[in-house]
Image (cartoon, helix red, strand yellow):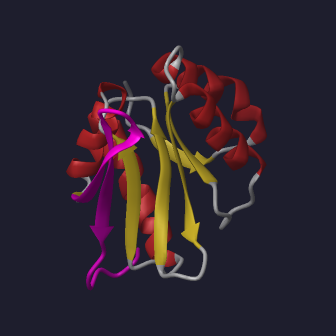
């Protein structure tokens, strides 16, 4: 795969991004919510609560991140990280961090079910400097915890 480029998610990307979601979450309890998050990002403007970012390599969308500001705070949230592998996810998260830092965020959070379907995203979060700072047992459903990943920016300067 060529080195990916990153750009905002556009309405014309909808079919390709939906296919990524179905490829990763099709037939799981997470498919519908992931599609909903992507739809929110497709319709959103830059700086919105659900902003989409795609990674493109070889003219194909390889991954997507849905992120945005948490209203009334100096925090951002990664709502979804879909497609690709760990290294691509880590790169996407780096771009998200830069965008959120420029927007004034001091930290990023991401909530993930402790499930195999999210293993790649969890590894990418760790690779991008996120740490698990909490978990709520049986939150997603019996036997499945919701993990809270946090990436604090500290004294970093936005690029």
Quadrant (top left/top right/bottom left/bottom right) for the C terminus? bottom left
What are the residue bounds of the magenta stretch? 132-159
Where is residue 155? Give x, y as percent.
Answer: 26, 85
Residue drawn where x is 57% and y is 35% of the image = 34
Quadrant of residue 17 within the rendered picture = top right
Question: In this picture, is 147 found above or below 22?
Answer: below
Relative side of 69 to 45, left or right: left
Quadrant of residue 149 within the rendered picture = bottom left
Question: In this picture, is 18 found above or below 79?
Answer: above
Residue 17 shown in magenta: no
Residue drawn where x is 62% and y is 29% of the image = 32
Residue drawn where x is 23% and y is 40% of the image = 123
Where is residue 63? Give x, y as percent.
Answer: 48, 34
Relative side of 96 to 144, left or right: right
Relative side of 107 to 126, left or right: right
Residue drawn where x is 39% and y is 66% of the image = 108
- Depth order, front residue of 86/150: 150
């Amino acid at each position: 795969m060529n080195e990916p480029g990153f750009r905002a998610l556009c309405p014309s990307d909808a079919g390709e991004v939906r296919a990524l979601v179905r490829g990763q979450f099709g037939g799981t309890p997470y498919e519908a919510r992931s599609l909903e998050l992507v739809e929110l990002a497709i319709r959103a403007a830059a700086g919105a609560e659900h902003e989409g970012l795609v990674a493109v390599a070889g003219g194909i969308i390889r991954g997507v991140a849905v992120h945005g500001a948490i209203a009334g705070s100096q925090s951002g949230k990664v709502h979804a990280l879909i497609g690709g592998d760990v290294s691509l996810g880590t790169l996407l998260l780096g771009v998200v961090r830069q965008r959120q830092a420029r927007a004034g965020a001091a930290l990023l959070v991401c909530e993930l079910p402790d499930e195999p379907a999210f293993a790649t995203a969890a590894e990418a979060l760790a690779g991008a400097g996120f740490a698990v700072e909490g978990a709520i047992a049986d939150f997603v459903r019996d036997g499945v915890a919701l993990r809270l990943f946090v990436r604090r920016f500290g004294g970093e300067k936005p690029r």
